[in-house]
Image (cartoon, rainbow, N blue to C red):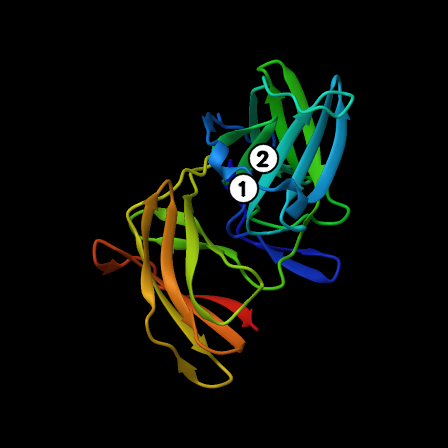
Amino acid sequence: MKYIQQPILFGLQLFLFSFLVVNFGGCQQPSSTTTNADDAPDLKNLILLKDTLSGPYQINILAQDSLLDKNETLYIQIKDSTGKPLENKELSYSMRMDMGMMSHGGPYAPIVKLGNGLFKAEVVFIMANMEGMGKGWLFEGVINKKDSISIPLQVHKAPNLRTTAVNSLEDGRFFVSCILPQKTTAGIQKVDFTLHKIEQHNFPPLDGYSLEVEPFMPDMGHGSSNNEPAQGRGEGHYQGTINLSMPGLWQIKVRLFKNGNKAVEEELIFPIQVI
């Protein structure tokens, strides 16, 4: 395992892999299964990303939209060959970025069983797929502890930053993901973040922080009132409140604190278009 810290030029684009964890053997970590039928979505509101036959199974992978390099929620449904959901199946999984001669993992949460053959997986895609380099992101699962599946996923570059890596004195290097749409309506609303520590090929959730959030309109030169810091909710999740008081381009400025002290020197900026 090692970090690649020098920029690498591919075609006309420069990719800086200062955060990239590389593993020539692939990265796997155990994923346990929890059950929460209350999280089951209306499948009619999701888009079908993949419809794959694997042995006796038909595997559907769905999401709210096309996948970007950020925190994403996937829904996986296991069916029989006739398309009937299989209720009595178990699923474990991991995520791997296949870049051809090397590969690496990324943060992901334990899978949640929703019933009706449906599972939910929260994944942080720390980079987009790159044309001509390997298979890209792979959803690698095991059904009932014996039947393996490997499904490629297309992950695009997000128009605006949503996941980035930072350095802290106490916890070293970790990923910060801002869970915001690219566009949203004006008003006071919740904003969510996830933090995941980089420990070679593992990415455990990181608790114990507070995130100060400050919306700012660069074109107008002002911020807003009634904002609340994002506080921990467990398992690396944080939630705060922001007031996007009018339409236009906003920046969500984020500063990280731990035990009342500034934990990360740099200020993070997540742009968002408000309509």
Q: CA distance from mark 2 to mark 1?
A: 8 Å
Residue under pointer 1: 123
Residue under pointer 2: 95
Foreground residue among 71 and 15: 71
Q: Residue at x 51, y 31 (%)?
A: 111
| Tag shown at residue 38 | none
Q: In the rendering, at what x and y percent does residue 115 appear? A: 55, 27
Q: Do the CB atoms of the residues marked 2 and 1 lie less than 8 Å apart?
A: yes
Foreground residue among 236 and 80: 80
Q: In the rendering, at what x and y percent does residue 273 appear? A: 56, 71
Foreground residue among 8 and 119: 119
Question: Callout 2: helix, strand or loop?
Answer: strand
Q: Amino acid at mark 2?
A: Met
Q: Residue at x 60, y 27 (%)?
A: 116
Residue 229 image-quadrant placement: bottom left
Q: In the rendering, at what x and y percent does residue 208 appear? A: 28, 47
Camera sees residue 108: no
Left/right placement of residue 19 relative to residue 233 reads right
- Which numbered disc, 2 or 1, marks the residue that appears first in the sequence? 2
For the C terminus, the image quarter is bottom right
Residue 204 image-quadrant placement: top left
Query: Badge 2 local density, few (<14 within 10 Å), some, or many (20+)?
Result: many
What residue occupies the far bottom of the structure in this picture? 220
